[in-house]
Image: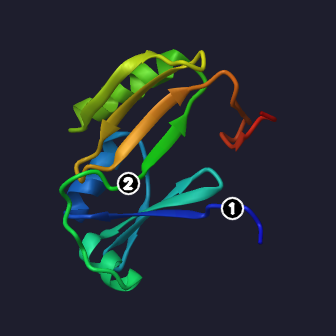
Amino acid sequence: MEQRITLVTLGVTDLPRSKAFYEQLGWTGQEVDETVFMQAGGSALVLWSRAKLAEDSGVADGGAAGFAGFTLAHNVRSSSEVDDIVAAATAAGATVTRPASETFYGGYAACFADPDGYIWEIAHNPGFKLAADGSLTLPEF
């Protein structure tokens, strides 16, 4: 099997609110059948009803309260990009959960929660090189 993540689907509680939030961050997408698809480099971010996603996945929806058990990361090329993105997210209604600061790995990062509580880490990691198209290739550790 090839190692690849092609889609990340977020089960959201209010699709118009979530779509507007991501649009305020500069993301663009297409809405088809109450589902929003946003190109994200070589993969896609999808916004869909939380209840429909749970039903489609064959699981019970435990509600939006608490930590979902995963985070999403957006690696950028500089510390100033981290600050710019966190500022835009805050203006769009995000809640900063970890203010931007230097990291143990020699980078700079912050975390925020989107309107549905999904945690995003925005990070500049000098050890993770980004290609011109934004794709990340992991280094040899």
Dot 2 alpha-carbon crowd within 10 angstroms: few under 14, some 14 to 19, many 20 or more: few
- The location of residue 110, given as percent across then percent down, is 40, 27
Left/right of residue 10 with respect to residue 104 in the rendered view: left
Is label 2 in a helix, a strand or a loop? loop
Residue denoted by label 1:
4
In percent of width and height, residue 130 lies at 70, 34
Q: CA distance from mark 1 to mark 2?
A: 20 Å
The relative height of residue 99 versus residue 27 in the rendered view (above or below) is: above
Circle 1: residue type: Arg
Query: Left or right: 127 with respect to 33?
Result: right
Quarter in which the N terminus is drawn: bottom right
Q: Are marks 1 and 2 in contact (CB under 8 Å)?
A: no
Of 8 and 104, which appears nearest the observer? 104
Tell me the quarter of the picture where residue 132 sits. Answer: top right
Q: Of helix, strand and loop, which one carries label 1?
A: loop
Q: Residue furthest right?
A: 140
Q: Nearer the viewer, mark 1 or mark 2?
A: 2
Label ID, residue 124: none
* Left or right of residue 108, residue 131 in this image: right
- Mark 1 / mark 2, whichever is N-terminal: 1
As drawn, the label of residue 69 is: 2
Question: On the picture, is 99 further left or further right than 136?
Answer: left
Question: What residue is shown at x 60% (from left), y 20% (from top)?
Answer: 105
Residues packed near mark 1 inside 10 Å, few (<14), some (14 to 19) or many (20 plus): few
Q: Nearer the viewer, residue 75 or 105?
A: 105
Disc 2 marks which amino acid? Gly
* Residue drawn at the location 31% of the way across and 75% of the way down: 34
Q: What x and y, as percent, mark residue 15?
A: 25, 64
